[in-house]
Amino acid sequence: AQKVTQAQTEISVVEKEDVTLDCVYETRDTTYYLFWYKQPPSGELVFLIRRNSFDEQNEISGRYSWNFQKSTSSFNFTITASQVVDSAVYFCALSEANPGTYKYIFGTGTRLKVLA
Amino acid sequence: DAGVIQSPRHEVTEMGQEVTLRCKPISGHDYLFWYRQTMMRGLELLIYFNNNVPIDDSGMPEDRFSAKMPNASFSTLKIQPSEPRDSAVYFCASRRTGVDYEQYFGPGTRLTVT
């Protein structure tokens, strides 16, 4: 069965600190996709990144970086030099790549509070 | 391009009333998903459509919930009769086959049933 675990329920950091949000997944599929979404206090869900199971390259986008490791079934998200605007709930999600089965399995989310 | 559009953004209704939530997916997207988010259960997939056809409604909680997609640019989620436990944020999302696998979410409808 598929499962996504975000063990960190809430994290608080002081502005300019680096913070890593953990995501561990379970799947029997060899082809799958992983995603991160941000849900700011305004409530919308904002897509941040997609990674497929064949691409283990780390990705950096500005202050955001993602570390995908199949060996540990993890897809962790790091924010460098955090800012107050980064305060949000962050969700990790897993999706099978089988045709016709594009459901997401969401983690429970990690609430990040960045204090000024 | 406009994103996924949902209406209303907020809905307050009394128990027993019918509630209809609306969604317009991104143009050209052929998959549409309805989710419900609560503190207790997190994000739950209720139903999804492909080319206007319902593919999987196993997440619909009970017969009081129904969803339709009469055309590629419009979908509704109806609750009749509504109950206080239906209070939640309902999200609609869409995606496009063959190009990418991510879903793009609407702003959500916050439903409060009193």
Image (cartoon, rainbow, N blue to C red):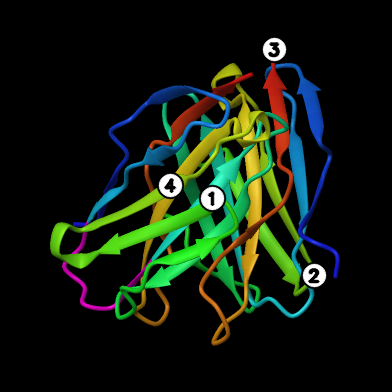
Q: Amino acid at mark 3?
A: Thr
- Residue B107: x and y in percent read 74, 44
Residue located at (85% from left, 70% from top): B1
- Please state the extent of the stretch shown in magenta in the rendering: A26-33
- Residue B41: x and y in percent read 42, 30
Question: Circle 4: is it few (<14), some (14-19), or many (20+) Cα within 10 Å?
Answer: some
Q: Which chain contains the residue that carries disc 2?
A: B
| Vertical side of B79 occupied by A95: above or below | below
Q: Which chain contains the residue that carries disc 1?
A: A
State which mark lies toward you, 2 or 3.
2
State which mark lies toward you, 4 or 1.
4
User: A63 or A46, which lies in front?
Assistant: A63
Q: Secondary structure at mark 1?
A: strand
Q: Is residue A61 rendered magenta in the image?
A: no
Left or right: A37 in relation to A42: left
Q: Give the Cα distance between marks 1 and 3.
A: 31 Å
Left or right: B62 in relation to B95: left
User: B32 or A78, which lies in front?
Assistant: A78
Numbered circle sitting on residue A78: 4
Q: Give the Cα distance between marks 4 and 1.
A: 13 Å
Question: Circle 3: is it few (<14), some (14-19), or many (20+) Cα within 10 Å?
Answer: some
Q: Is residue A27 rendered magenta in the image?
A: yes
Which residue matches tag 2?
Answer: B73
User: A7 or B59, which lies in front?
Assistant: A7
Which residue matches tag 1?
Answer: A37
State which mark lies toward you, 1 or 3.
1
Left or right: A23 in relation to B66: left
| Vertical side of B41 occupied by B73: above or below | below
Q: Amino acid at mark 4?
A: Thr
Q: Which quadrant would residue B37 be assigned to in this image?
A: top right
Question: Circle 2: is it few (<14), some (14-19), or many (20+) Cα within 10 Å?
Answer: some
